Image (cartoon, rainbow, N blue to C red):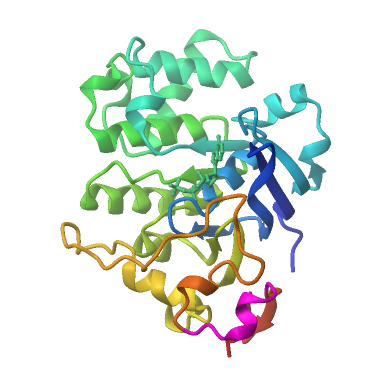
Amino acid sequence: MTAPLLDVRGLRVAFPMGGGWGEAVRGVDFAVAPGEAVGLVGESGSGKSLSALAIMRLIAAPGRIAGGIIRFDGQDLLALPESGMRRLRGRHIGMVFQDPSTSLNPAFSVGQQLVDTIRAHRPELGRKALRDRAAEVLSLVGITEPQRRLTAYPHQFSGGMRQRVLIAMAIACEPRLLIADEPTTALDVTVQARVVELLNRLRQQLGLTVLFISHNLDLVAELCDRVVVMYAGQVVEEAATVDLFTHPRHPYTRLLQRCIPRLGLAGHRLPAIEGAPPPAGRVPPGCAFAERCPDAVQRCALAPPARRALDGHDVACWEAA
Ligand SMILES: Nc1ncnc2c1ncn2[C@@H]1O[C@H](COP(=O)(O)OP(=O)(O)OP(=O)(O)O)[C@@H](O)[C@H]1O
């Protein structure tokens, strides 16, 4: 296998809780190969966003990275000085977050915000070159008449178009890795599908490597080669997308498939997985999913299952077969 572009090993993120520290990310391992798109899925609170923020070293105090190794292109990110991290963010790793209305500044034109982003990493470019590059990336994300649109303000764009502008900002400096955290959640279903189409096209056109975080398994299936399923701060299953969807091995993955929003079903009430995940810092001693698991047996509550290989899947379950 080619060396991964991103390699996360034993990642732990902790917060002060009840006089001590509680872990919300509890030893997460996954890797993303160059050119690959990997999906990170799981219920709300499973630690997906914290894992992404940790990769960028953006965990807000008092939270902290409590352990693990994060390598990007062979570099140990947890050993980099903050100045090195600042050079890397935006330049080599681009990010897109959930809500375009909070990520764009309403007081500045889209062109100005794009130009500022590009200039931060390419100070050698003159005014004309910066504007040309800004128009070029707008056109890359499918915005027509890009030169004219540069002068428009965020409120003059629809939600889907604003999300395209954010993707344009994230790819403006040609990063090798794009981390997209729930980039479509605030959008309606058809627009969500278009954003994923765009990401797919950019993958092909620019050779982008993508870490895609989403609740929506259909979107993950459209975009990703491999899926990593998280529960209560840990990875419980990982497999190639096709294998994960056709033969999910972990009972949690199976329930997730039944319960999580699917395209075309918007507006329907979906069954939720009964119960709730254990809160960070209060995870029981055995398998964290045991309490809610339809297949749990006695030993599940006693000791946590380690990840093991099973027919091309990697699964953390005592009973998976
Ligand atoms: N500032 C904080 N203080 C204490 N605990 C926190 C803090 N931020 C996050 N957590 C804990 O970490 C858990 C995981 O959060 P995270 O945002 O990574 O989940 P997620 O899987 O991305 O969920 P979502 O899909 O809702 O974004 C939260 O449920 C919460 O228990």
Q: Position of residue 303 (x, y in %)?
A: 70, 75
Point out the image quarter for the C terminus: bottom right
> In this rendering, is residue 108 above or below 308?
above
Residue 135 appears in view: yes
Main SS, magenta residues: loop
Horizontally, is 66 left or right of 161 in the view? right
> In this rendering, is residue 311 above or below 100?
below
Q: Which residues are magenta?
A: 295-304
Q: Position of residue 250 (x, y in %)?
A: 53, 78
> In this rendering, is residue 38 above or below 13?
below
Q: Position of residue 48 (x, y in %)?
A: 53, 50
Picture residue at 75% right of the left edge, 21% below the top: 83
Residue 53, picture quadrant: top right
Q: Position of residue 255 (x, y in %)?
A: 40, 74
Picture residue at 29% right of the left edge, 21% below the top: 154
Q: Is residue 34 magenta?
A: no
* The residue positioned farthest toward the bottom in the image shown: 321
Residue 318 appears in view: no
Horizontally, is 75 left or right of 22 in the view? right
Residue 91, picture quadrant: top right
Viewer-nearest residue: 9 or 22: 22
Point out the image quarter for the N terminus: bottom right
Picture residue at 61% right of the left edge, 71% below the top: 287
Viewer-nearest residue: 197 or 317: 317
Viewer-nearest residue: 131 or 265: 265
Viewer-nearest residue: 199 or 314: 314
Q: Is residue 302 magenta?
A: yes
